[in-house]
Image: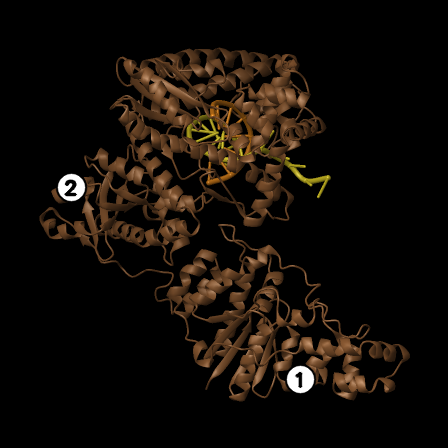
Chain colours: A brown, B orange, C yellow
Amino acid sequence: MDKLVLIDGNSIAFRAFYALPLLTNQSGTFTNAAYGFTMMLMKVLEEEKPTHVLVAFDAGRVTFRHTSYGDYKGKRDKTPGELSEQFPLIKEILDTLEIRHFELDGYEADDIIGTMACAGDEQKIATTIVTGDKDLLQLVTEHVTVLMTKKGVSDAQRYDIAEIDQRYGLKPKQIIDLKGLMGDSSDNIPGIPGVGEKTALKLLHQYGSVEEVLANVADLPGKKLKERVGENKAQALMSKELATIMCETPLDFSLSDIIYRPFEPAKVAPLFKKLEFKSLLKRISQEDEESSVLSVVKELTYHLLTEKDTSKWEKLLREDQLSLYVEMSSPSYHRAEVSALALSSDHDHLFLPIEVAQGWEAFREWLADPSKKKCAYDVKGTQIALKRNGLDSAGFTFDVMLASYIINPSESAHELSDIVERKLDASLPADDEVYGKGAKRRSLQGEELAAHLTRKTETLTRLQPVLEEELEESGLSTLYFELELPVSHVLTEMEWQGVKVDKEGLQELGKLLSAQLKELTSKIYDLAGTEFNINSPKQLGEILFDKLGLPVLKKTKTGYSTSADVLEKLAPQHEIVEEILHYRQVSKLISTYVEGLMKERSEEDGKIHTRFQQAIAATGRLSSTDPNLQNIPIRMEEGRRIRKVFIPSRENWLLLAADYSQIELRVLAHLSADENLIEAFHSDMDIHTKTAMDVFKVKEEEVTSQMRRQAKAVNFGIVYGISDYGLSQSLNITRKEAAEFIERYLESYPGVHKYMEDIVKKAKKDGYVTTMLERRRYLPDINSPNFNRRSFAERTAMNTPIQGSAADIIKKAMVAMKSALDEADLSATLLLQVHDELIFEAPEEELETLSEVVCRVMEEAVELSVPLRVDVDTGKTWYDAK
DNA sequence: TCTATCACG
DNA sequence: ACGTACGTGATAGAG
């Protein structure tokens, strides 16, 4: 028995959109209408068990109805962008489910459905129309029923001839007459003014049709009604015509084109996964009898390689590309031990204990051959771990971790198991689960290790094409392949190189600071009249505010705030406060820097090898861990001395530091095209002085240091996504004063003002912002009804293109630097990056050439509408290279 | 494990 | 009226 289901795509999507909250998935795509639509669709497919399915959509804006009545659908609100952008998504879902969908220029979805319903009726096929629109009731016949959505989307009411009769006392065709008389405000069909559903029904019950009603105007009850009907005869007839659904739409397909075959869950799951349709995912996987959709419990067949049988696997190394995963004892690949590695092609999975890999000559050659393509998770860590085990490697053309990051840099979880969860219809136990964490950590061995590891490499092979496609779809391929991947290779070199630390110098400094701390401690105990743990904010708070009775200016969730900005305000009130501030400083220097750096210094080479994390910061910046070398003190002289222990690794070498001057404000000048700001940079002015002149309306000579300091804070504010409150906090002024500063700034730099407004608007429309090199950051909260979340997202929208473009620029310079140094035949090496600064070490005689090369490469990394300026300094220590 | 604090750009 | 500056990482204390 055939069963035809006709779905009114627009109507269901509308219903779903307004019935559900404005959901977004991780990448900021609105999904509520698509989700509701799919829920409805699944339910219908399950319950109706159709043999033929079709979804009809409205095409374009102008239909034949507009031709006859210009105002047709005139009053309808414009479809909100959050909904219209979901239509392509809905169509993609239908395509994946292999359900045909149609739209036809000049016609509405109704007309396609009407025509198919007529065909179904003629051929006596049981037909169900799914819609939220009462108009379609006119199509009901002996064979055709309408499934009408009620509140929400999952609830529906079936209308057949009997139901329509019971509800309206009409035959289906009379629904047209009903519309003709009462009109339809949503479609802007006028009908007869003053005639609503009640009157219209009464008239139709008596006369049967619009024409008959009009023919009997004279007999109609009530003077008003007579008048109205009499005056609007033509309008009533036209309304009826507008409400009539076409049954002769010229369609270029027939029943045989819309045959429905139940979909394969395995094909649909990845899309649902991507859209985060979790409950639907569960639903389809259950239908699949839990075979394989979510759980790839299916054991992988892998080959555990021993020294003896390496030769028979050499053929695997001739594959176009292989995935490689190196298993380590900890994430700190500069120290971690490698237990084993695994190789995967599409078909074969090979497990190699580290000794076997080291002893297999053909593998070593393959690994070091740059023309042999390899895919890995965290290429940098992989290459360093391999190198520490005597294995040189090259030819890594894909990094799964980096790809996942570039696709969505806001995502906090780029572990392989997280990526698999998001991008594939599979799952992988997280390393923490397999190994346990903290004290429970254990090591894996033998078969267990082999199974876990080969499963990871197998996953890499499956992830790569999925990620590649997603990069391409979002226009991120260039950024990924030409910037991020090359940068990761530069970082590998930098980390491998490491930076030399003067052990004795560090110990010396430690002693000095410890002595100072001791003195401060006893002084503080004296002043407090008791001993307590100064490092404990809780105990400190009790001393300051309870015992000494200082005023409480700020509180935290847990009690009194003792942060530096509070203490600074309290300093005049009690001698102890200043000592505490000083104590904090010294204590920080000892614990974080002296002791922290000492712990990370390798006894082997006397160097520190930080890890530059490339897949953390949402703006595209790098971060540095174990230890963090991007936050070595500089602002206070006392802390700055820490920099004296960072020295060149060889004799007669020096350090060279090159930093971009005002890169973020220059980027802002470029992005905003603000004439005043551009001019300021072209004339090489001190930008904070210039801002002070504009904000305070004074001449250059009249700018005081106080004004310059305030102007500097305003500039920071602009870069961070200005708010009066934020500025008032940082300058210790009232919000009103801060707001005035901002206003005067924006008046002086109208281009910046417009840019800030435009970028927020664009973010609201697209759901994301981009940097100069098209790096993308999604802002799911940008349209949030929650003021806080929305404001945060708006500031992020303003800040990310600036901070992110600056990150793009220095990354580009780093990539270019590699070849520039080679070309100039320099042995200088890049050691560190600190956001807007690069630090090199080089033999003394190279410094002059190096300065020139470094400046040129950094300044010419990209072309902006303002010049980029780089300052260079050299010295025997990092402290001296200032 | 979470919170407060503070170091950097 | 809402209550924030943007982006990070490390440490110590407290639960």
Q: Looking at the picture, which amino acid does disc 1 mark?
A: Lys
Q: Are marks 1 and 2 on the same chain?
A: yes
| Residue A691, image x, y percentages | 61, 23
A510 vs A562: above or below: above
Q: Looking at the picture, which amino acid does disc 2 mark?
A: Glu
- The reply to whether dot 1 and dot 2 touch (C-beta < 8 Å) is no
Q: Nearer the viewer, residue A557 or A108?
A: A108
Q: Nearer the viewer, residue A352 or A517?
A: A352
Figure quadrant of residue A104: bottom right
| Residue A185, image x, y percentages | 73, 68
| Residue A18, image x, y percentages | 62, 61
Which class describes the residues within 10 Å of circle 2: few (<14), some (14-19), or many (20+)?
A: some
Give the label, 1 or 2, closer to the camera: 1
Figure quadrant of residue A754: top right
Give the secondary structure at mark 1.
loop
Q: Nearer the viewer, residue A559 or A234?
A: A234
Give the secondary structure at mark 2.
helix
**A21 relative to A324 in the view: left or right:** right
Q: Which residue carries the number 1 mark? A: A173
Q: Residue furthest front?
A: A67
Mark 1 and mark 2: Cα distance apart in space: 79 Å
| Residue A610, image x, y percentages | 35, 29
Q: Which residue carries the number 2 mark? A: A365
Question: Which chain is mark 1 on?
Answer: A
Regarding residue A15, the answer to whether it shows in the image is yes
Q: Nearer the viewer, residue A659 or A342?
A: A659
**A45 relative to A18 in the view: left or right:** left
